[in-house]
Image (cartoon, helix red, strand yellow):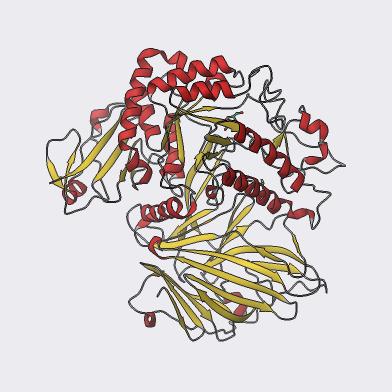
Amino acid sequence: MPIHHLTNSWILETDHTAYAFGLDSGGRLVNFYWGERLLSPSDYPTQASSQNWASFSNAGQLAREEYPAETGLKYIEPCFKAYYADGVRDTVLEFEKAEVQGAELRIHLMDALEHLGIILHYRLHETYDLIERWAEVTNRGETAITLERVLSAQWHLPRKRSYRLSHLYGRWADEWNIKREALAVGKKILESRRITTSHHGQPWFAVDGGTANEEQGEVWFGALAWSGNWKFIAETTEFGATRLSLGLNDWDFAWRLKPGESFSTPAAIYGYTHNGYGEASRRLHDYTREQVLPNGKTLRKVLYNSWEATTFDVDETSQVELAKLAAEMGVELFVMDDGWFHGRKDDHAGLGDWWPDEKKFPRGLKPLIEQVNALGMDFGLWVEPEMVNPDSELYRSHPDWVIHFPQRKRSEARNQLILNFACADVQDYILEKLDTILAENNIRFIKWDMNRNASEPGWDTAPGDPRELWVRYVQGVYRVWGILRQRHPQVTWQTCSGGGGRVDLGILRLADQAWVSDNTEPTARLNIQEGYSQVFPACTMEAWVTDMGSEYLPLEFRMHVSMCGALGIGGHLVNWGAERRAEAAKWIARYKEIRPVVQFGDLYRLRSPQQDSYSALMYVSKDRKEAVLFAFRTHQPFIPQLEPQAPVYPRGLDPQANYAVEGYEEVRSGLGWMRIGIELFLEDYQSTILHIRQVE
Ligand code: GLA
């Protein structure tokens, strides 16, 4: 029984972890415990007193509240703040009741005076050692309420320790950098105000006591399933208490909740491990593959994308020429990128007019798709549904459909404006256009792109508060995408936003894979992929070999880097020449052999490329019968002999079973290989893949 109910307290147990909370002596819902699973329910603390420390530090300031609302003598970050019709801006949440339904606990809280109800949902994912939390706010009164802040969760770390926060930061073409920094008194705030998840941060955290590494150490981690504005706050008080909050960004946020209406926050997923960052990632990976992704157990195909070869200059001839070469190399999915639709000569025109350009494709897309299919490949297409160029039929007919303040200038970025996906008319127009393309053509893959962020966030026809835009926009995108997915289940979807600008556990309910960066230079990519892997599994990580880095990096190295994820090719195949294409074909065949282990196996990051010029990682199949180890050397000291290269120590093998490592004669137990290591000598820009197999 994973949910234990004692008097006024609840203990949530997963296979290896536990989370306990309940009512303190003052009736507040407070956290008692978050950590390793203990031996029996009686092991957990189930009480907390509620005493004032001084008139300046009231009990409310000190309590480890599960979902603090803005009220009384407390000055910490609240989860909830509302403005009521009677002018009150204070919410007093009192416990009403608790219900258990299957693996979900619901705690009902209520502000009786204002007729506001909040249900805190806790859903256990026992085998993943994860808990999912969200809040549902209901207006049970007779006047509208303005919600000003509604976060998904607040967590409390064990007291009196110092903590270190790991998070991801970046910018366009340089996403997924890992930053680890000590948390000191005060706040560390990470957020997006851009209408997407953004290249600049990720709604994910991992906190440890300062000494955790990939293999060991306590780590408390979590992530938000949301593709719009988000906020993460790590707050360390003057009493040495650290609390973490995550949810919708309250910057420029408001939501008008009419009588009888409810508002649900996005879900936050969180967990604890004492086996380091590696285990934290593996738990998120398994959960994402099995519970979030629509088809997480389907192998991702090797794709070719023609963007870097032909850019906007697409037509039937150029695409068929590339398709033939791709098919010969063993590519399974041919994707035509930007440039195919009405009026799209460059990035100044066309967005919004989602039908084939009459000059480039006078016969429509069908003849091209048929030729691609005849070559044995699926066909895929690029779209950017949320965008419009002022130079388009759509904008000329509906200039008011974009996000804007009518009185002000509309800032363009990449010559485009954003359609207001909060509006049903906009959603329906795009739905109809994409539905038609998908119904009329044998399209098996859609790359859904989003190439700018919001500005001048006006919505003058908003039925509620115009600031609802930020949330309703994302809900609109989810709705259109969800309907298309349902109507066209044969399609695999990719999320892209100028690279990795919109990857999160929300979009991965709709998208099967993600374009993680527009930067495909392989040495940069090693870092990008390491950062990405903190949160997301390899089957979602599209990794293409393009022409970036081809002047100084061998094809083998470039292929190896991309073989760590869902392999794709994006170079100009005509320019590659027969020899390079034949070599790539060999690597594609090799990838097909190892891809079940890469895409569905457990990831072990052995040596960090963000810290070491000699990096390594491995994937181990779930039954531990097979593993694939990748190692890369980018650069080394001037006289390499002076630096003997340390062996790479594999991990995740069955210690008792025997393994043979490709290229090595000796057979050793898993324990032997993990303790003795594998000696590898790599020169600059050398890399290797070792297949490791269990033997009798
Ligand atoms: C974005 C994407 C690229 C490509 C171009 C097309 O930059 O990230 O992969 O699709 O748009 O315009």
Q: Does residue 338 show up?
A: yes
Query: In terms of depth relative to the viewer, which is nearer, 533 or 539?
Result: 539
View extreme (right): residue: 407
How many numbered marks does the figure carry? 0
Residue 217 placement: quadrant: bottom left
* Residue at the (68%, 71%) spot, across then down: 70
**Lateral position of residue 389 relative to residue 548, left or right:** right
Which quarter of the figure has residue 45? bottom left
Where does residue 138 sit, x and y in percent of width and height? 69, 70
Residue 534 position (above or below residue 114): above
Tell which of 660 and 592 is nearer to you. 592
Q: Is 34 situated above or below 52? A: above
Left or right, 134 with reference to 640: right
Q: Is residue 575 left or right of residue 142?
A: left
Q: Position of residue 7 (x, y in %)?
A: 49, 86
- Quarter holding ligand 1: top right
Q: Quadrant of the N terminus?
A: bottom left
Residue 67: give x, y in percent of width and height.
60, 71
Q: Nearer the viewer, residue 55 or 352?
A: 352
The x, y position of residue 72, in whole percent, is 69, 77
For the question of whether residue 78 can be seen, the reply is no
User: Image height check: is 189 above or below 161?
Assistant: above
Q: Nearer the viewer, residue 637 or 382?
A: 382
Say which quarter of the image contains residue 558. top left
